[in-house]
Amino acid sequence: MTFPSLTLTDLQPLPILSEAVNRPSISCSISLQNDAPWREFLWKMKKPTGIFEENHIRAVNLLWDDLKCRVPFSLPLPLTQPTSTGNIQLAWDAGRFYLEIEVRRDGKLEWFFRDRKTNYLAGTEEEPESAVSLALLNRLRQVVIF
């Protein structure tokens, strides 16, 4: 039996993400004791090789540190990607519950929560938040602890 050869590039997901396949089907995020590979991925998106300014990447790191300090449990690593509007999106998908936080260039936060079973929606609408709100923390707990 012959297998095709594979070439890994920076476009490939972090190797640790492959562990998500072995998790229960209701979860798409993974927990890591060491978030260094994720932070390294963020910094690779910095100009001049990436598309984001240093302050934008720094704002995402500060948000991550804030979230980790404010929840009393191990926070799963978010699925992270740039958006078409120039934001950096962090997302947690637990099957029934979904939460995304977008960090804007100005450091403000836009977030969206959905309960797929009840179709309940929450989040910022017209006005982004300048800091992590209690409502956002409660939804994060709901997604992660579910």
Image (cartoon, rainbow, N blue to C red):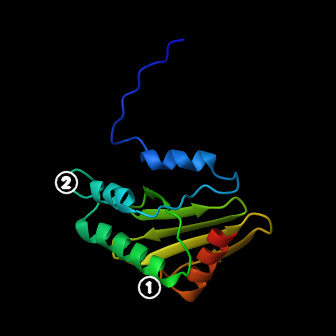
Left or right? Give the position of 22 relative to 46.
right
Front residue (pair 20, 112) = 20
Q: Estimate the x, y position of residue 82 in percent, counting from the top left.
A: 41, 57
- Image: 2 above or below 63: above
Q: Estimate the x, y position of residue 50 in percent, counting from the top left.
A: 27, 53
Q: Residue furthest right?
A: 118
Q: Earlier in the sequence, mark 2 or mark 1?
A: 2
Residue at the image point whose x is 62% and y is 69% from the top: 144
Residue at the image point whose x is 40% and y is 76% from the top: 65
Q: Estimate the x, y position of residue 56 in percent, counting from the top left.
A: 31, 69
Do the CB atoms of the residues marked 2 and 1 lie less than 8 Å apart? no
Left or right? Give the position of 6 relative to 118.
left
Front residue (pair 81, 41) = 41
Q: Quadrant of residue 106?
A: bottom left
SS for tag 1? loop
SS for tag 2? loop
| Residue 98: numbered disc | none
Q: Residue furthest left?
A: 48
Q: Quadrant of residue 53?
A: bottom left
Q: Quadrant of residue 62?
A: bottom left
Amino acid type for the residue under numbered disc 2 = Pro
Mark 1 closeness class: few <14, some 14–19, many ≥20 residues within 10 Å: few
Amino acid type for the residue under numbered disc 1 = Ala
Mark 2 closeness class: few <14, some 14–19, many ≥20 residues within 10 Å: few
Identify residue for label 2. 48
Q: Estimate the x, y position of residue 98 in percent, counting from the top left.
A: 64, 64
Quarter holding the C terminus is bottom right
Left or right? Give the position of 5 relative to 113.
left
Identify residue for label 1. 131
Residue at the image point whose x is 52% and y is 86% from the top: 133
Give the distance between the C-alpha atoms of the residues marked 2 and 1, in whole angstroms.
28 Å
